[in-house]
Amino acid sequence: MPIPVILYHHIDEPPPHGKFGRSHHVSPQTFARQMRTLKRLGFHGLSLKEAMPYINGEKYGRIAAITFDDGMMSVYKHAMPILNELGFTATNYFVTNQIGGQNAWDIPQARPAPCMGKAELLDWVAHGHEAGAHTLDHVHLPQIDRHEAERQIFQSKQELENISGQQVVSFAYPYGEENPLMRRLVRQAGYQYGVTTAQRRANTHEDPFGVPRYTIRCRDTWVHFLAKCLWRK
């Protein structure tokens, strides 16, 4: 059975129409309604690590994997309380050189937004959520040389493990940009999974280093959201 793996970025009020990054914002109220709808439909929200046995066909149940890219403070403030209330877990992919910083990779096109600091990251994992790596600097991996790509992939894992005190097994390719070499480097770094932005549900025996995710955007209607979770392949 295909498993929906859904991706969010900012859980905050979207910028005005026409502003850069608007589509990556989902309001706190909309996010809460979406999560409660999943609960009412019988879904259990899981981190990617907990969802992989279902994706691999080793476990069975109605689950949705919930992921966030970039480690934004808005996720800590607005998403984590809802997840905790519903008994859901999720994976957040951190840009390790911006822990306690901001979305430097988006500036000046986008408005500055704070990232979680070490205290928030530790509280995130203390509540049962997963911390994954998203490189050191949110780089375009296929566009940089192999040595720098290795540094971004390997060191982000090491630094995140040093901060969290937990093994980091999941990696998200920035901008969804990846290729066979990047998948190989992620495997060699010791990760167990890599997530993309291919817009489909995850199927049994999916390549663990090419797990697809549906991006949830501010313009998504209820029909769009439910289609991504229930109907689309």
Image (spheres, helix red, strand yellow):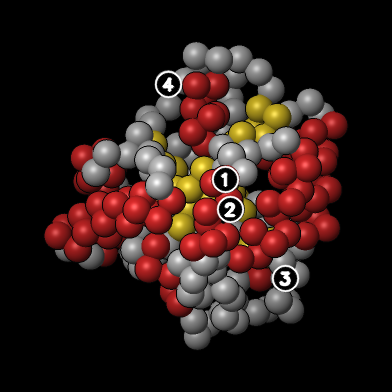
Q: Earlier in the sequence, mark 4 or mark 1?
A: 1
Judge depth for marks 3 and 1 and give the one in front: 1
Judge depth for marks 4 and 2 and give the one in front: 2
For the N terminus, the image quarter is top right
Secondary element under disc 4, as helix, strand or loop, is loop
Front residue of 145/118: it is 118
Few, some or many residues within 10 Å of mark 3 (<14, 14–19, 20+): some
For the C terminus, the image quarter is top right
Q: Earlier in the sequence, mark 3 or mark 2?
A: 3
Q: Earlier in the sequence, mark 3 or mark 4?
A: 3
Q: Say if mark 2 contacts mark 1, CB within 8 Å.
A: yes
The residue type indicated by label 1 comes to: Ala
The residue type indicated by label 2 comes to: Asp
Decide if residue 99 is in sight here.
yes
Give the residue at mark 4: 205
The residue under the point 52% across, 36% down is: 48
Q: Residue 151: x and y, percent? A: 21, 59
